Image (cartoon, rainbow, N blue to C red):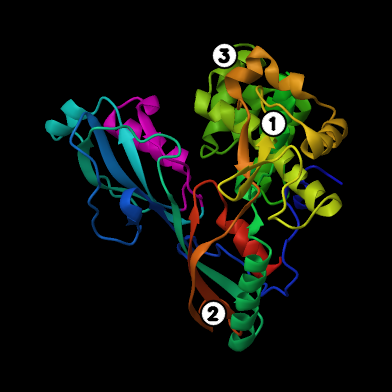
Amino acid sequence: MSSLDPDRFLTQHITTTTGIGGRIKQVAEDFVVGEIINYHQILDPRSESFILPGKKGLFLHFVLIKNDIDTSSALDWISKLWKIQRNNFSIAGSKDKKALTAQRVSVWGAKTKFEKKLIQNLSFPTMQTKALCMKLKEIRLGNLWGNYFDITVREIKYPKERISKRIKETQKEIESKGGILNSFGQQRFGDKRPITHIVGKRLLQEDVKGAIKNYIGKAFETESEEIKKARTIFWENENPKETLNILPSHLRIERKILKELDKRKNDYFQAFNSLPLQFQKLFIHAYQSFLFNKYLQIRIENYDMNLNKQLTGEIKHEEKIFVPIIGATTELSGQANEIYDRIFEEEGINLKNFQKPFIKKIGGKGTQRALSFKPEKIEIIEIEDDDLNTGKTKARLSFEIMKGSYATEFLREIMKN
């Protein structure tokens, strides 16, 4: 089975109920995400205005509202328009690309420009900034409670009553089993090109050339013919100039790497190092997430499906069970060690791979992640005829999830796709 196959990097369903089927994200507005910040304030992207918490200080804060654009690209554009270094921008976490989302952003070094009115709110079809204000503290990774979701599932073939019944049955089973597997969702590996973890493994093996070759040159059937042609040229010839001639301009990261390769005569290591450090880290983190998902899969298939039962080597804290995410400082024992030993053998790696200086710089030290999670405040808002798909039904749900967990994992349980 290919490591690009979803069955390899996503976990199986924990519930046994029949799903409602359907599809998500037919349009970006079907997937509304609002960051939940201090005092449980929800930054709903459909709101007209926001009042951000915090004392006055030297950091510029604002709410970024984006529609069908990834967080990194939106911030790249804002940094260019405001003429402020990209590394001065910080966020609590990225949001889905094909979605309508809102989140806080902080910027260092913008005070003078803001006071001189050289920085003002931006408004474009794909992104807006709102609530510009000066605050005392920087927004750092993890500075949020979680996220609010308002999701429309479309193209459901079942009648309204059956859809409602199935959703409620799944909710009940989730409760009885102690939650949902706290897997990393497909966004972690790439929605259209699930390759981030493959690149991460190559980097872990210190094969930087192989990592870049996969990132740029691995073509996917879902891509346009133009993109597939460009990727194939690079895969076969490793010719950055020829690839650049036909690779579309919106593939900014690929083009940046190719330009560096052309300038540095195919020095792959230097080309990789030209990327922002935060972006470099995505790949090792994705591979760590892949290993974590494999752990969960083996755990429920070969050890215990009860998410309230602790295995040896796992940690219990405040009634929650935590599982190791492998990194440089990870120490394993008991059944947790057994599971990871099996994964290491399958993957051809070991803990020492994570302890090399290059990997320490671009990878995680290792941490603990909750085994399961429970969505909160689940509400079926409406179930009605699907206005975009004749003869089909749509279901609109809202819920909240604490930071670090994926709404798509809850939706996979509901939909069973």
Q: Quadrant of the C terminus?
A: bottom right
Q: Position of residue 199 (x, y in %)?
A: 70, 31
Residue 347 appears anywhere in the view: yes
Count of numbered labels shown in the rendering = 3
Q: Position of residue 226 (x, y in %)?
A: 65, 43
To which residue does mark 1 refer? 326
**Which amino acid, by three-letter code, is at mark 1?**
Ile
Q: For the point 46% across and 48% down, which residue is it?
A: 69
Q: Nearer the viewer, mark 3 or mark 1?
A: 1
In the depicted structure, whether residue 267 falls above or below residue 73: above
Q: Is residue 225 left or right of residue 337?
A: left
Rendered image: mark on residue 207: none
**Which amino acid, by three-letter code, is at mark 2?**
Asp
Q: Does the magenta portion include 93?
A: yes
Q: Could you say which is closer to the camera, residue 221 or residue 273?
A: 273
Q: Earlier in the sequence, mark 1 or mark 2?
A: 1
